[in-house]
Amino acid sequence: MDIERLLRLIGKYDVSGSLVWTASLKFFVICNDLFFWAMADLEPIIDDADIDLLEQCLSDADDDGMSLYCARKRGMRPQEPAYRVEIDKKNWPLFDACGPKRDAIFGNREDQPRQESRSATDNIQQDGPAGKPIQESRSAADN
């Protein structure tokens, strides 16, 4: 495997945060929770053919390229919630083409329609105890 080519590709697309490697220079793409909930998961980059696939995925899907690599390599679509949280809507057809529609499993319900990505703060409850709005505390000097 051409490690220098791999590292240049990772640098070009600035995706080093999605890559891990061992002391013996075996490389893996991180795909935690992409296919299954609560799953620490990696997809290996084994040879030059994998580097070719990774390069194509990064070219096709920009920031979603590392996840697309994992999906194409496995021939599997991500779980449905990953579409709503992790994958840019413009790339959904690329992921759909990776494999057949997945069966509904915990957290992967068909009755939850896909929506565009949301920020992590959209799900934070903004109410305090007993449903009362949270109020900023003010010191006596502010009054």
Image (cartoon, grey):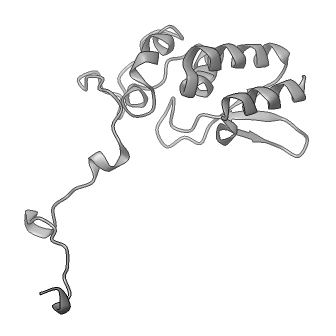
Residue 109 drawn above or below residue 42: above
Residue furthest toward the front?
A: 142
Q: Is residue 56 left or right of residue 22?
A: left
Q: Position of residue 111 (x, y in %)?
A: 23, 23
User: As rendered, which of 40 and 137 lies closer to the eye?
Assistant: 137
Count the marks: 0
Looking at the image, which residue is at 46% across and 38% down?
37
Residue at screen point 55% across, 18% down: 61
Q: Quadrant of residue 127?
A: bottom left
Name the image quarter holding residue 133: bottom left
Of residues 70 and 15, the one nearer the viewer is: 15
| Res 116 quadrant in image | top left
Image quarter hosting the C terminus: bottom left
Q: Which residue extends farthest bottom?
A: 140
Horizontal side of 140 relative to 44 (left or right) equals left
Quadrant in which the N terminus is drawn: top right
- Residue in view at x 43 percent, y 30 percent: 82
Q: In this rendering, does residue 102 appear at all?
A: no
Q: Give percent across and percent down for residue 25.
A: 88, 38
Image coordinates for residue 109, horizontal then vertical, percent: 30, 26
Residue 125 placed where, x, y %? 22, 56
**Which is more toward the observer, 138 or 127?**
138
In the image, residue 101 sits, relative to residue 34, either above or below, namely above
The relative height of residue 17 versus residue 142 in the rendered view (above or below) is above
Residue 108 seen: yes
Depth order, front residue of 22/89: 89
